[in-house]
Structures are given as structure tokens and as C-alpha cells.
């Protein structure tokens, strides 16, 4: 690693990868610090033993980072490629209405973002699922399409960043890719490289253009220097366990792209603990949104078999917006290893009941009593209609984005109260019940949202470093530059000031393209990166 770069990027998810790529293409020297590992496709967790090490901590450096807070849990990723490694591949633009809300900077409208959305869609190769040769549409996809139509709604086959054609070399990285094999493990990394993850496209382009990527490097503080550069201190996890090295690198520009939680936490520490950035806004940490996520509500006991784990994890969706709220529902597949891990670990009463039924049947048959088929036990009962005859969903909607991130004992905490967003969640539940009824199944709320936990789980944390037109209303300006700190930028999900009511990566990507374009134009007179 050199002492100084034109740009130091912190984090390699959608915001970081796009920034690194565009600035490197424009001839800047770029260094990317990423706390997670570089993942090889054969090392993604699949067995239960591997699942036990799949979660992020200082020792395992796992792929998934699950955070528990009092009223909401957050799942996110760690690794070179950030959320793209584990995401469900959906690439969908937020509706124009979203950008009309007063919290958005006035210049950021859907029409202004469209050219940047186009650019990201091209590189991520997002398109509706075309089944790989010899395979039909997944039964889960068909069930969602049928449910929506039977409920009188018009569903969409979603754009997803999944490759389904003949074996090829990825056009950006040259990495061999195979067609999706419908294993349904998208959340645990793709072992055939069918997912068009950021390491196969934007980050590969960044490296081709000279960017240096440092995995297992976690940024811990940012400090302005007298000559307008910034010093970034980082932990280096690459040495022997326990032999942590703290070192530093200087950036003429620094782009924080550590995700909504990561960026907000880092900047809160710089403001309140290391006190190296004391002029950061008092709005830092405010405006947290879980994107109105409702994960894993389910239609159970369907009259047809689905096997929800088969196929890319999300494939279809339906707009269920009302006069007052934007709401969007999608099919959702849970990877089998993850499901088995939960099944093995969580003792729910329904499981004990079904286990009792199966054991009773088993013993009766050993004794030669009961049942017409003496050698057969109905093992399907073990899951009581929860596996084969169930359609899980992901719901997203316009929550009020009124959560607050803060530091407690130096670590991020989220204060979130769903009261102000209750009307939206009630409307979402009505739409989910409507779909369940249309399929002649039984609606079941997400296990976390049910009594006694009554919690939410989000995979789409947003906000914390919101954009604003006026310094007093946000943390960064409309191009992600931090108020009071010229040359320091934030470019990731944390700058989004409201819920998007749709999977956010496309919008984060479009904003990152726009921010990078601005950075390049601003510092290179007459240079236009891609003619926008
Ligand atoms: C299971 C799952 C499924 C999802 N499915 C979808 C989907 O289908 N479509 C969609 O649009 N979105 C989806 N998402 C959400 C999507 O992944 C995120 O919105 C997106 O990745 C956020 O991009 P980002 O640039 O803000 O941050 P991230 O992609 O989260 O990247 C941040 C990176 O910064 C690193 N980092 C954090 N702190 C530091 C530090 N201090 N120093 C160095 N590095 C650091 C992290 O390890 C991470 O790699 C899903 C998320 C999950 C968890
Ligand atoms: S289902 Fe997901 S993880 Fe499995 S091959 Fe397809 S894209 Fe990859």
C-alpha cells in the first residue's frame, strides 16, 4: 500500500465499487479498504458446520453480518463486493413518487437519475429471469404471478442480476460463469458465479484500471490534515490472530461507502469519540429507515407444491401501493442451509408438535399398528406445510424513516419505533392476506413480527448520513460531499433520506454513479465520463 492516493474508498459494496471503478477509469489512483474477505466461489458456506462460521465477527470474518437491536434486526454483508455477494439480485428503480418527497434534494428526481440507473443496469446485466436450458420457471415464481393475477393485480417478472445462458467468461472480468442452477443459495454466495456480483464487474474494472483493493482492512477513524487531505486509520486483520495492526493511509479525497450502519457508525465515532471530525452535522444518525421491510411473512398450507428454496431467491413482484403508501411485494426463497441451521437451532412449539406426530406414527408402525402402508412414515409432516406448500414473501413499503442511529458504548445502536409507520404495515398485511386468499392458502406473519418478539428484520437499512439541500437538514449535499468537510464524501445507502419501498441497490448504484460523475467533472474541467 502506498502512503497517499488520490482517493481512498472505505467499503466495497455498491457505493464503494462504483466509486472506485469510475474514479480509476478517470485516471485517479484509488485504494479500497474493505473489512471483509475476498471470497472464492468454492468457499461460500454450505454445510451446517460452515454456517456456524458464516457470520461476521473479528475472528471468523464471515459473510453475513446480523445485528440485533431492541425493535429491529438488520442483516447485511461483509466481503469484497459487499451486499452483492449475498443479495437476492433484484435490480429495480424506485418509483418517481419517492423522489417527490420533500426530504430529497430538489435536483434528484427519477428523470435525473435515469441515465445513471441505465449505466448501472448495463454493467450489472439486470434482466428478467429467462430459465436456464432445460428448466421451467421456478414454481415459486409461478405461484406469485398466479396469486397476483387471481387477486386482480398485474405482477412483474423482476430484473435480476443472474446469468442463465451458456457457460461464458464474464465480459468485465473474464471470470468463468455458469448458468444459474436454481440452488436457491443466493444469500450464501453463488458457487457457480451465476450472480453478477460486484467483484465480477465494477470491482474488476476498478482493478484493471489500477485500483488497489485491500480486504480485511477496517477503517476506524478519519482525520483532516492541514493541506486538505484526510488520514484514514485502519485495522489490518491479515496477520496472525490477535496480532492486529493499526496503520494509516492518506487520501486527497475520501469516500465513505461502508453501508448505512457502517458509514454512520464510523462518522459518529469520528465526531464523538476520536473527535477528529467535530463539525459533522447534528443530523448524523437520524432518518434511519428499514425500507418498510417485512421479511418472511408466508402463505402456508397451499393446495400446490412449491419448494420455495428452488430458483434465484427473488424473481417476481407486485405493486400493492395504496392512496397513502407505496408498497411492493415479492416472492422469497430461503437458502436450504440457512433454513436447516434455523430449524436445528430454534425450538418452536409447532416443530415439537409435528415431531411428536411423526414419532408416534413411526413407533405405531414398528409395532405393526395403524396406517395402511406399514413401511411409510409421512416425514413431510415434520414441517407442517411450512416447506413444500409454502410461499414466503418480502414486503417493502414507505415507512416513516424516523429511526435514529447512535453510539452506545462505542457501538452502533438503532432506536426504532414502528408506531408512526403502523398504517403502512397494516396495509401491507392486508395485501399479503389478499394474495394468500387468492392461492387458497393460510396467511402467517413473519416469525419475528409475531408475539412475543414483535420485531422487524430489515435487509435494506437506509439513512443516517442523509443528503439535503441545506446544511441544517442533512449530513451530505446532493453529491454526497459532507457538509463542512470538502473532499470527504459518503456514497452508499446511508445518504438515502427516505424509504424507497423497493430493493435499494439500483438506487444506491445510480446515486453512486451520479456522485462519481460529479467528483470527476468537478476536478477535471471539460471531462465528461460517459456523456451525461
Ligand atoms: C440477504 C440480503 C438480500 C438482499 N437482497 C437485495 C436485492 O435483491 N436487491 C437489492 O437491491 N438489495 C438487496 N439487499 C440490500 C443490498 O445488499 C444493500 O442495500 C446494498 O448492498 C447496500 O449497498 P451499500 O453500498 O450501501 O453497502 P454494502 O453493500 O453493505 O457495502 C458496505 C461494505 O463496507 C464494508 N465495511 C463496513 N464497515 C467498514 C469499515 N469500517 N471499513 C472497511 N469496510 C467496511 C462492509 O463489509 C461491506 O462490504 C439485500 C441485502 C441482504 C443482506
Ligand atoms: S439460485 Fe442463486 S446461488 Fe444458486 S446458482 Fe442461481 S444465482 Fe447462484
Image (cartoon, grey):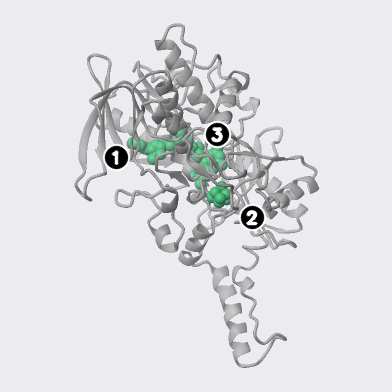
Left or right of 488 in this view: 1: left
Residue nearest the observer in this picture, 43 or 413: 43
Label 2 lies in ligand 1 vicinity (Cβ under 8 Å): no
- Provide the residue designation for mark 3: 124
Seen in the picture, residue 136 relative to 380 is either above or below; the reply is above
Where disc 1 sits, the SS reads: loop
Q: Indicate which disc residue 463 carries.
A: none
Mark 1 Cα-neighbour bin, 10 Å: few <14, some 14–19, many ≥20:
few
Q: CA distance from mark 1 to mark 3?
A: 36 Å
Left or right of 182 in this view: 305: right
Q: Earlier in the sequence, mark 1 or mark 3?
A: 3
Seen in the picture, residue 506 relative to 37 is either above or below; the reply is above
Task: Give the residue displayed 34% in from the left and 18% down from the top.
Answer: 485
Is residue 418 among the parts visible in the rendering? no
- On the image, the x and y values in percent for residue 41 come to 45, 49
Where disc 3 sits, the SS reads: helix
Mark 3 Cα-neighbour bin, 10 Å: few <14, some 14–19, many ≥20:
many
Q: Earlier in the sequence, mark 1 or mark 2?
A: 2
Q: CA distance from mark 3 to mark 2?
A: 30 Å
- Provide the residue designation for mark 2: 298
Residue nearest the observer in this picture, 475 or 342: 342
- On the image, the x and y values in percent for residue 519 come to 42, 16
Q: CA distance from mark 1 to mark 2?
A: 37 Å
Task: Give the residue displayed 70% in from the left and 85% down from the top.
Answer: 373
Q: Earlier in the sequence, mark 3 or mark 2?
A: 3
- On the image, the x and y values in percent for residue 242 come to 21, 49
Mark 3 and mark 2 residues within 8 Å of each other at the beta carbon: no
Q: Indicate which disc residue 410 carries.
A: 1
Which image quarter: residue 252?
top left
Mark 2 Cα-neighbour bin, 10 Å: few <14, some 14–19, many ≥20:
many
- On the image, the x and y values in percent for residue 110 come to 61, 22
Task: Give the residue displayed 67% in from the left and 47% down from the top.
Answer: 131
Amino acid at each position: 500500500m502506498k502512503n497517499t492516493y488520490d482517493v481512498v474508498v472505505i467499503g466495497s459494496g455498491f457505493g464503494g465499487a462504483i466509486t472506485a471503478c469510475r474514479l480509476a477509469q478517470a485516471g485517479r489512483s484509488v485504494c479500497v479498504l474493505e473489512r471483509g474477505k475476498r471470497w472464492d466461489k468454492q468457499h461460500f458456506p454450505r454445510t451446517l458446520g460452515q454456517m456456524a462460521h458464516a457470520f461476521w465477527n473479528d475472528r471468523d470474518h464471515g459473510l453475513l453480518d446480523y445485528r440485533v437491536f431492541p425493535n429491529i434486526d438488520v442483516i447485511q454483508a461483509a466481503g469484497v463486493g459487499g451486499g452483492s455477494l449475498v443479495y437476492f439480485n433484484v435490480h429495480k428503480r424506485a418509483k418517481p413518487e419517492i423522489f417527490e418527497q420533500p426530504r430529497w434534494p430538489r435536483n434528484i428526481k427519477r428523470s435525473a437519475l435515469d441515465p445513471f440507473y441505465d449505466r448501472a443496469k448495463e454493467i450489472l446485466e439486470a434482466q428478467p429471469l429467462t430459465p436456464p436450458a432445460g428448466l421451467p420457471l421456478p414454481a415459486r415464481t409461478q405461484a406469485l404471478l398466479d396469486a397476483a393475477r387471481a387477486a386482480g393485480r398485474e405482477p412483474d417478472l423482476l430484473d435480476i442480476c443472474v446469468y442463465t445462458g451458456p457457460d461464458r467468461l464474464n465480459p468485465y472480468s473474464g471470470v468463468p460463469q455458469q448458468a444459474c442452477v436454481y440452488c436457491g443459495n443466493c444469500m450464501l454466495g453463488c458457487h457457480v458465479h451465476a450472480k453478477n456480483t460486484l467483484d465480477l464487474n465494477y470491482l474488476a474494472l476498478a482493478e484493471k484500471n489500477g485500483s488497489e483493493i485491500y480486504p480485511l482492512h477496517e477503517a476506524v477513524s478519519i482525520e483532516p490534515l492541514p493541506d486538505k487531505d484526510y488520514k484514514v486509520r485502519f485495522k489490518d486483520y491479515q496477520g496472525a490472530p490477535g496480532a492486529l495492526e493499526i496503520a494509516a493511509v492518506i487520501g486527497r479525497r475520501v469516500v465513505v461507502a461502508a453501508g448505512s450502519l457502517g458509514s454512520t457508525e464510523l462518522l459518529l465515532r469520528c465526531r464523538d469519540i476520536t473527535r477528529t471530525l467535530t463539525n459533522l452535522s447534528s443530523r448524523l444518525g437520524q432518518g434511519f429507515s428499514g425500507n418498510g421491510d417485512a421479511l418472511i411473512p408466508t402463505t402456508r398450507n397451499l393446495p400446490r407444491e412449491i419448494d420455495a428454496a428452488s430458483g434465484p431467491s427473488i424473481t417476481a413482484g407486485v405493486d400493492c401501493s395504496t392512496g397513502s403508501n407505496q408498497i411492493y411485494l415479492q416472492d422469497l426463497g430461503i437458502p436450504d442451509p440457512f433454513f436447516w441451521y434455523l430449524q436445528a437451532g430454534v425450538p418452536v412449539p409447532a416443530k415439537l408438535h409435528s415431531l411428536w406426530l411423526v414419532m408416534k406414527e413411526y413407533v405405531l408402525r414398528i409395532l405393526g399398528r395403524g396406517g395402511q402402508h406399514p413401511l411409510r412414515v409421512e416425514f413431510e409432516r415434520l414441517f407442517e406445510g411450512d416447506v413444500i406448500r409454502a410461499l414466503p414473501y418480502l414486503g417493502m413499503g414507505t415507512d416513516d424513516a424516523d429511526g435514529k442511529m447512535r453510539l452506545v458504548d462505542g457501538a452502533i445502536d438503532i432506536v426504532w419505533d414502528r408506531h408512526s409507520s403502523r398504517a403502512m404495515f397494516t396495509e401491507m398485511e392486508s395485501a399479503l392476506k389478499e394474495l394468500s386468499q387468492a392461492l387458497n392458502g393460510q396467511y402467517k406473519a413473519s416469525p419475528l413480527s409475531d408475539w412475543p418478539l414483535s420485531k422487524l428484520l430489515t435487509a435494506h437499512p437506509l439513512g443516517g448520513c442523509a443528503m439535503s439541500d441545506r446544511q441544517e437538514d442533512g449530513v451530505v449535499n446532493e453529491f454526497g460531499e459532507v457538509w463542512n468537510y470538502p473532499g470527504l464524501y459518503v456514497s452508499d445507502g446511508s445518504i438515502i433520506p427516505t424509504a424507497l419501498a423497493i430493493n435499494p441497490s439500483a438506487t444506491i448504484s445510480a446515486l453512486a454513479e451520479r456522485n462519481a460523475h460529479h467528483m470527476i467533472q468537478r476536478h477535471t474541467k471539460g471531462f465528461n465520463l460517459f456523456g451525461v
